[in-house]
Amino acid sequence: MLLLYLSYAILWISSAVPVVIAAAGKSIFILAGQSNMSGRGGVVNDTWDNYIPPESYPNLAILRLSADLNWQLATEPLHRDIDTAKACGVGPGMAFASSLLGKDSTVGVVGLVPCAVGGTNISQWARGGELYKQLIRRAEAALEGGGTIRGLLWFQGESDTVNREDAESYKTRLQNFYLHVRADLLLPVLPIIQVALASGEGEYVEMVREGQLGMDLVNLRTVDAKGLSLEPDGLHLTTPSQVSLGHMLADAFLQTRPSALALTSGHVSRLTIFPKILFSGLFANFLGSRLFF
């Protein structure tokens, strides 16, 4: 354990300059959803056991956007200053980034943007709500130092299994969320990797899963968490399960074709001068003129 802490200290000290330099060329991934995305691996009775698996060790090529919108070396728990109501533990983000770096030499530096908040339902993520606005705000801030948004990782739905109406409406609400995120980030084919539920807070888990597994959008991939081991609460993935999920997410992302329209800091400054209402009305024309530039 002492050796691990010393390794962290060395990484933090030696990475101060590389973090600043590396930020300009990063591949950015948004992490959103509820507690299984923010991470409860190793958390029992709202206390994290502090165990970090090797797959989630810090890496100079993996950064995270903090709550105050600064890039820093990524360490577990990734969502510690975002999902603050309860203790965070290990999530899938670090294992995803490590796996991706090991399988795709073109990725470069990975920039993770934590946005997940435990206990939230899909209606709370609707366009106009605080969670949605925070996601868009953080995604846009992540681009200010340069880089490209490469994908959205989404794990949510447990809270929508309690009420039948919510479960029945889940597919439509989730699809609208995806389309709105793509439109507001000017990324019409942004790769989205979603996770089908492993558990739920209510009796309509299968109904929500049907909505997730039955969704058909371009550049959408679904990985299934069903069967992964859970913490004693029967709701949250264990640390080994989160590591497995991270690998699954990386494999799924690599199956998506490259986005035809990458949103970079340059595009933001050039495109967002137009009012959103104009963008919405001319969305089809925009695609026709900008998809292949």
Image: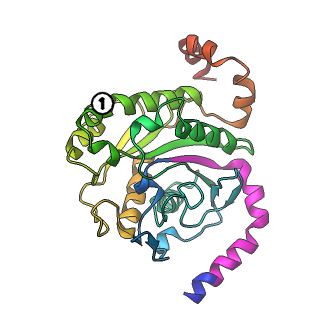
Nearer to me, 102 or 263: 263
Rendered view: 130 above or below 238: above
Residue at image coords 51%, 37%: 258
Magenta segment's dominant SS is helix
| Residue 281, x across and y down, in percent | 57, 10
Q: Quadrant of residue 271?
A: top right
Rendered view: 154 above or below 261: below
Nearer to me, 29 or 280: 280
Residue at image coords 68%, 74%: 11
| Residue 85, x across and y down, in percent | 51, 58
128 displayed left or right of 201:
right
Question: Can you name the residue that lies furthest to the bottom here?
Answer: 2
Q: Quadrant of residue 1?
A: bottom right
93 displayed left or right of 27:
left
- Which region of the structure is painted magenta? 6-31
Rendered view: 119 above or below 43: above
Nearer to me, 165 or 102: 165
270 displayed left or right of 39:
right
Task: Answer few, some or many: residues within 10 Å of disc 1's Cα (few below 14, many 20 plus, some between 14 and 19).
Answer: some
Q: Which residue is mark 1?
A: 169
Amino acid at circle 1 = Ser
94 displayed left or right of 165:
right
Q: Is residue 188 magenta?
A: no
Q: How is the image coloured?
A: rainbow
SS at mark 1?
A: helix
| Residue 272, x across and y down, in percent | 70, 24
| Residue 222, x across and y down, in percent | 34, 43
Residue at image coords 60%, 58%: 81
Residue at image coords 47%, 62%: 95
